[in-house]
Image (tube, rainbow, N blue to C red):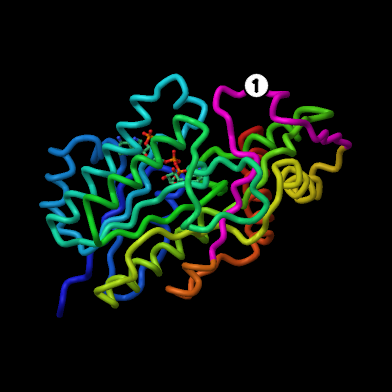
Amino acid sequence: MAADAKILVFGAGGMLGQELLSVTPPPGMELIGLSRTQADITSSRQVGRVMAEHQPALVINSAAFSNVDGAESQPQAAMAVNAQGPEILAKACAQAGAPFIHISTDYVFGGSGQTRPYLESDPPAPLSHYGLSKLKGEELVRSACPQHLIVRTSWLFGALARNFIHIMLELMRTRPAIKVVEDQVGCPTPARELAQALVTLASMVLELGDAAWGTYHLSGPLIINRYQFAQMIWAEANKSLDKDLTIEPVGSEAFAAPAERPAYSALDCTKIKQRFGLALADWQPELARIVSFLQESEMHARV
Ligand SMILES: NC(=O)c1ccc[n+]([C@@H]2O[C@H](COP(=O)([O-])OP(=O)(O)OC[C@H]3O[C@@H](n4cnc5c(N)ncnc54)[C@H](OP(=O)(O)O)[C@@H]3O)[C@@H](O)[C@H]2O)c1
């Protein structure tokens, strides 16, 4: 019997990485996750060692320096993980003949004056060191490994790692009023559904052998601002909280965050639908599941 095709996932300890490792792979495929302590993607030696050990049929990189504000004060660290690391992985994949799926971000775009979702062919214009480092990573991956798929996604949320939902629930539980920005528009994306779609993509690439290599957008279908997202979280949270809360829409200047975010960064996901038949569905049931899971966990933690 033929051995299973191994999919090696770097950054397996992160929000998306954990979800990737929770997916049940199709028959004939095995998912192997490596956290930062098991393989630092900025080390050619460590990447070379695990590639030789596992001999993967395909590699997915979900490792990143994802702290958008932190990247403003640590631009070199962000560049190392988001640009040099992916280049090391891409070179190792090219050498091993393994296709490479690399995850990127809507923050490669600037958002200024944008009124329709971004196409893959639209010119990037990052506003932050995080966006700049991710864009550089894309460029290095393209030139180091022809057999690549760069999947840009946006506004990830999930139950397994701290994200916008965790922050909102904490504020909603403890405060009578909160402020949320309304001048950032994007597409919230459930990490669990994205992970499932990426594993499907990986299996299609392995079946096809020769996929339509290039850059793709894949995010949730709803285009909303952060204030509207908070309102949707509150609609779920208040089913069990039953309290009065004022949510005030404000401009980004109210928070003076170190990194500038795009005012608009919705992604047009038509291309991946046309080429691979992949699209993410309405995520409101997943939002309800996550909110009730987090509220129950929080209640247990208090008892
Ligand atoms: N989160 C979002 O809203 C969002 C939006 C758009 C795109 N994305 C992209 O989606 C991908 C997954 O993001 P995420 O939210 O899952 O990020 P995350 O939760 O921060 O996970 C990233 C993982 O990478 C690991 N890592 C950091 N440096 C590493 C290194 N040198 N070698 C190996 N692993 C390293 C981190 O380990 P430590 O925890 O030990 O640092 C962490 O486990 C990233 O490419 C990100 O840019 C995310």
Q: Is residue 30 left or right of residue 289?
A: left
Q: Nearer the viewer, residue 2 or 214?
A: 214
Amino acid of disc 1:
Ala
Q: Can you name the residue that lies furthest to the right here?
A: 244
Query: Which quarter of the picture shows residue 113?
Result: top right
Q: Is residue 97 left or right of residue 86?
A: left
Looking at the magenta stretch, what is its main secondary structure?
loop
Q: Is residue 24 left or right of residue 50?
A: right
Q: Residue at x 24, y 50 (%)?
A: 143
Q: Can you name the residue that lies furthest to the bottom here?
A: 1
Q: Quadrant of the N terminus?
A: bottom left
Q: Is residue 197 highlighted in magenta?
A: no
Q: Nearer the viewer, residue 71 or 298?
A: 71
Query: Which quarter of the picture shows residue 280?
Result: bottom right
Asked if residue 233 can be seen in this view, the reply is: yes
Q: Is residue 259 highlighted in magenta?
A: yes
Q: Quadrant of the C terminus?
A: top right
Q: Is residue 117 left or right of residue 71?
A: right
Residue named by callout 1:
256
x and y, in percent, of residue 46 in the image:
16, 39
Relative to residue 229, is residue 7 depicted above or below?
A: below
Q: Residue at x 21, y 50 (%)?
A: 144
Instruction: Report the magenta residues as a range.
Output: 244-269
x and y, in percent, of residue 67 in the image:
47, 31
